[in-house]
Image (cartoon, helix red, strand yellow):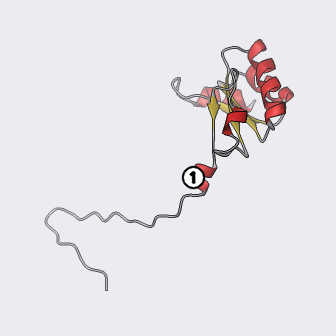
């Protein structure tokens, strides 16, 4: 139901992605019309057979691997049935940046904070 609802609410150019924890969930998502299936926290030994089985039944569905992937183990997640690989460590390791944007009406001077 969620995929169908997202598909109805989304613009035709938007893709619907469903996070799945098993082959059964991935098949259900693909049957419901998901454009992408995110296989989350799969070990490479589970990921590749699951992705292959999914692509055999739904060749047009994109498969994304995510969860626990680092630059060191990245090669183990690459494969012919994996379309996208997400590395959360790229953003999770980034330091926070504090910035602001001040807008002033035309003809007014900026005011320094006290």
| Residue 53: % across, % down | 81, 18
Vertical relation: 31 (above or below) 14? above
In the image, 94: left or right of 37? left
| Residue 27: % across, % down | 80, 23
Vertical relation: 64 (above or below) 98? above
Vertical relation: 48 (above or below) 111? above
| Residue 34: % across, % down | 68, 25
**Residue drawn at the location 53% of the way across and 63% of the way down:** 95
* Residue 5 visible within the image: yes
Quadrant the N terminus occupies: top right
In the image, 56: left or right of 36? right
Q: Which residue occupies the foreground of this view, 110 or 4?
A: 110
Quadrant the C terminus occupies: bottom left
Q: Residue furthest bottom?
A: 114
In the image, 11: left or right of 43? left
| Residue 107: % across, % down | 13, 66
**Residue drawn at the location 31% of the way across and 81% of the way down:** 113
Disc 1 is placed on an element classified as helix
**Residue drawn at the location 74% of the way across and 22% of the way down:** 30
Would you identify the image quadrant in which residue 108 lies? bottom left
Vertical relation: 50 (above or below) 89? above
**Residue drawn at the location 46% of the way across and 64% of the way down:** 97
* Residue 28 visible within the image: no
Would you identify the image quadrant in which residue 56 lies? top right
Circle 1 residue: 91
Q: Which residue occupies the foreground of this view, 78 or 61?
A: 78
């Amino acid at each position: 139901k969620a995929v169908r609802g997202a598909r109805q609410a989304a613009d035709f150019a938007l893709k619907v992605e469903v996070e799945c924890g098993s082959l059964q969930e991935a098949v259900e998502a693909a049957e419901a019309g998901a454009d992408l299936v995110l296989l989350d926290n799969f070990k490479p030994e589970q990921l590749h057979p699951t992705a292959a089985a999914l692509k055999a039944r739904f060749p047009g569905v994109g498969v994304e691997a995510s969860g626990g992937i680092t630059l060191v183990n990245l090669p183990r997640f690459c494969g012919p049935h994996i379309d996208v690989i997400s590395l959360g460590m790229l953003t999770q390791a980034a330091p926070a940046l504090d910035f602001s944007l001040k807008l002033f009406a035309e003809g007014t001077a900026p005011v320094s904070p006290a």
